[in-house]
Amino acid sequence: QVQLVESGGGLVQAGGSLRLSCAASTSILSINTMSWYRQAPGKQRELVASISSSGSTNYADSVKGRFTIARNTPTATVFLQMNSLKPEDTAVYYCHAPPDTWGQGTQVTVSS
């Protein structure tokens, strides 16, 4: 079973950028959809963005135009480029591979 390790979180001011990485322990060539989720304190975990093996992407309305998901199959890595960050983007961000594999999460904090 694949294992996922996220990195790249941190503290940033509103309007700033961060790039999250999700490193998989095995090839992601056969994994159709890789996704990023986030969970803010007191809220349910929500889908942020997903990318299929063909490169098709899907974004939550709240991040469209600001976040970009990408996957690098040779390095088994999935990225989430986050620009124009807002305080409401503050959350723990998780990488997900089907059917039910999650990373440990990386904290993103956006100050106003």
Image (cartoon, helix red, strand yellow):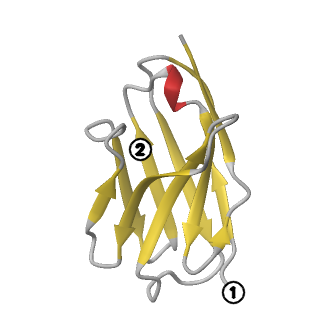
- The picture quadrant where one finds residue 64 is top left
Q: Nearer the viewer, residue 81 or 74?
A: 81
Instruction: Look at the numbered disc 1 and give the secondary structure of its residue.
Output: loop
Q: Amino acid at mark 1?
A: Gln
Q: Position of residue 41 (x, y in %)?
A: 69, 34
Q: Classify 68 as above or below 107.
A: below
Q: Classify 91 as above or below 22.
A: above
Q: Are marks 1 and 2 in contact (CB under 8 Å)?
A: no
Q: Which mark is residue 73?
A: none
Q: Classify 38 as above or below 99.
A: above
Q: Is 87 situated left or right of 26 in this image?
A: left
Instruction: Name the residue: 36% across, 39% down.
Output: 63
Crowdedness near tag 1: few (<14), some (14–19) or many (≥20) residues, C-alpha within 10 Å: few
Q: Amino acid at mark 2?
A: Gln
Q: Position of residue 36 (x, y in %)?
A: 50, 56
Which numbered disc, 1 or 2, marks the residue closer to the eye?
Answer: 1
Instruction: Name the residue: 63% across, 37% down.
Output: 40
Q: Is 57 situated left or right of 34 in this image?
A: left
Instruction: Name the residue: 32% across, 36% down.
Output: 66
Q: Position of residue 12 (x, y in %)?
A: 56, 22
> Marks 1/2: CA distance?
26 Å
Q: Mark 1 or mark 2, which has the lower sequence index?
A: 1
Q: Nearer the viewer, residue 87 or 74?
A: 87
Crowdedness near tag 2: few (<14), some (14–19) or many (≥20) residues, C-alpha within 10 Å: some
Q: Which mark is residue 81?
A: 2
Label 1, on which residue? 1
